[in-house]
Image: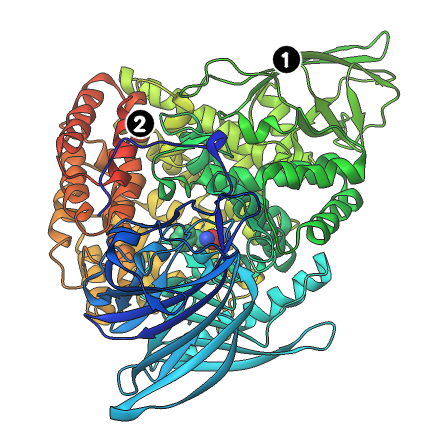
Amino acid sequence: MRTDTGQVFRLEDYRPSDYRITHTDLLFRLDPHATLVTAKLTVERRDGVAANAPLVLDGDGLVLESLGLNGAPLAGEGYTATPDRLEIRAVPAEKFFELEIVTKVSPVTNKALMGLYQSKGNYCTQCEAEGFRRITYYLDRPDNLSTFQVRIEARKAEAPVLLSNGNPVEHGDLADGWHYAVWHDPFPKPSYLFALVGGDLGSIHDTFTTASGRKVALGIYVEHGKEPLATYAMDALKRSMRWDEERFSREYDLDVFNIVAVSDFNMGAMENKGLNIFNDKYVLADPETATDVDYAGIEAVIAHEYFHNWTGNRITCRDWFQLCLKEGLTVYRDHEFSADQRSRPVKRIAEVRNLRSLQFPEDQGPLAHPVRPRRYKEINNFYTSTVYEKGSEVVRMIHTILGPEKFRAGMDLYFERHDGQAVTIEDFLACFAEVSGRDLTQFALWYHQAGTPRVTVTTSHDPATGDFEVNISQTVPPTPSEAVKKPMHIPLAFGLLGPNGDEMEMGSVEGAEVNDGVIHLTAASQTIRFRGVGSRPVLSLNRGFSAPIVLNQDLTKEDRLFLARHDSDLFNRWEALNSLFVEALIAAAAREKEGKPHDFDAALVEAAIEIAGNDGLEPAYRALALSLPSEADVAREIGNDVDPDAVRAARDALRREIGGKGRDAFRRIYDQHADSGPFSPDAASAGKRSLRNVLLDYLAAAEAAPELAALQFETANNMTDRAAALTVLAHQFPEHEATRKALAAFDARYRDNGLVMDKWFVVQATIPGAATLERVKSLTAHPAFSLMNPNRVRSLVGAFSSGNQTGFHRADGAGYQFLADIILSLDRHNPQVAARLATAFRSWRSMEEVRQLEARKALERINAEASLSRDVKDIVERTLA
Ligand code: PHE
Ligand code: ZN
């Protein structure tokens, strides 16, 4: 394991390496305990580098078996090898030479799931970001682009399937029951995109013909017996391939494209060239075991990894500081894909909810960092929602600022100019600046400045002159090691609503660049005057969430209700209602603390009920509008001195209030939207289910009785409805007999299916209240749980610590101590997942005082552990700083 050495990597220290590896020839002889890896590297000295400059290669815990140079063994004085580094001093004088390295690795004992490891007995690899150096010594950095030829040898009984990147070259039998396969990848790539799979797997196959007529063989490899569960993923893959041709003219470039699903995987999936490796959660689905959310997740992740073939693989990152170059852009592309496949406004609202619940707290806490960081201790800790989701929002803003044609032209230029290169954010932005003639210098601050900008807006209207004045000011709050911020270029899509709810015409505008329905805010404070505005308009601002900001606008309750009913921008309609809910919950939480009774606004409750029955809006949209802000959302808006128990009580009360007033209407809509016919995972059917399940939550609260949920649980013909009913039962009636029965029935039915048991763990880990901690502790002993499997850890421990405000933030600190214990034991075998869990502490300073003290104790206990991984150390230190 890599422990902390105090080393910090800095963007400004970037230097090209002295040598390049231009071709990589690998031979693997697969064995669970002793896999031999022979790497023959074609090395080139860069021009201008001294002939005696040493060649320094990265390693991580490697065992070196032998070394050869240009075909001859290398003598001991010619090199220094440690597990983490190989330095060759006896470098030949020629520009090109060949280095042969033999290492020995043990896949079966590799529980960090980086490098070559085994999952359920199958061999697989994970190399991003720095896992390749756990396989052989290498220039393990993304700017080293090499072609690869890979020969895999394995026992045929153990691993009949042998896969690697690129195209298949040959395969055949060897002596003693062994066989081999050779793969060749003609596209030069960095080592983080290397992959190998060897195992006894089932598969499904299909073909895709590209726009220019290339026939591609598609394969998805899964555990035997699970083949039918991969058909939705295959369909999503073909739709992704088509979409990238239609939207960005990007075609696939190899003869084969393979996906392998494994059950032990640290992240969601990995875009290795021609051989994507997936967490099985993002491949396997059928109505019996997957929810609509799972189906949507599969579609998005399949698309994401496929899209990386161009944004990430053909054009890759110069260094890891540029991670958002591939991730932000690829998330943007998968968001657009899903929006096209499903409902655009519904997708957008879901994205913003996700951004607010994950990225905003990151940006507002001790782990805040720019979309393009300038320093890191451990790169694994920068696969964050800031790099991914905020990175995507930044690309979306480029689209908003330039408009669709210029944006597309910029993308075209990027693909044309940088194909086959390892580049930077500056290279990316230059393409858009060039095609549009726009200066994007100020805009680039979105990549460099951390923190969520706060935008404050006041308006005034003069009926006599017809002037409508809008004052907008922005501040970017200080973040770790960045106290002073510059004003940003913030594109605010907007509209003015007239008294009848229609969009108003406006005359001339002064005070800012305003075009195509977008206000370009560029100064700390600007006053914008619209002329010829006859009657007082309601300003609908930041439409479609055009900029990832916190907006404080001087709208009255009536204005917001008006927007909630009339805005032509469906995002802002949702936003208006949502902001009213947040306000109501903040006020209710305050009253709760003072022991006062609730007094929710009748008009707000009425508006919610009205939306539920509004047939002019699609069901999925209505479901989102009716989903109350989460306890964490409210806590974030309160910002400091948060009492999670008061927040929870307030939210329960509002749910009861709306449920009670809407009861009859909700029951009618619930019945009307019952599923008829066979299950279909399409967006419209999923939308009906989501509306029904939101209403079920309200109805159960109104009735204060579990019967309806219990009935739905028993009669459901799909996992979406079953899991939703189970959630209502467990969260509203945790101690009820009906809940006990349902949980036991679920357990009995699915106990052998880890992915389904994940839902069972999540439901229980997120039951509000102090008692849940004991439940979670005892579930760690459940046979379906394992600290070795990242999905199980995330569903039980991750869901508890990041999704259970009242449970995790128990006032006595027992939730914090539990998480500390898990982190310390997990860190011994899987630092990456342990570090991820530790980020649950990031909002500790916003809690009330007693909880802050308890959180600090737990953090300090972790920090005191002598052999902490670099991953956990980095998170804990920054969280405490
Ligand atoms: N690059 C992967 C993805 O987005 C994520 C990943 C990172 C997977 C590191 C594994 C390890 O799409
Ligand atoms: Zn990605």
Return the residue nearer the eye: 598 or 118.
Answer: 118
* Sequence-first disc among 2 and 1: 1
Residue 10 versus residue 667 in the image, above or below: above
Does the numbered disc 1 mark a residue whose Cβ is under 8 Å from ligand 2? no
What is the three-letter code of the residue carrying label 1?
Ala
As drawn, is 809 to the left or to the right of 215? left
Q: Quadrant of the C terminus?
A: top left
Is disc 2 surrounded by few (<14), some (14 to 19) or many (20+) residues within 10 Å? some
Q: Residue at x 49, y 26 (%)?
A: 450
User: Where residue 868 sits: x, y (%)?
Assistant: 18, 38
| Residue 327 in view (yes/no) | yes
Element marked by disc 2: helix
Front tag of 2 and 1: 2
The residue that label 1 is drawn on is: 524
User: Where residue 160 sits: x, y (%)?
Assistant: 34, 85
User: Where residue 254 sits: x, y (%)?
Assistant: 59, 72
What is the three-letter code of the residue carrying label 2?
Arg
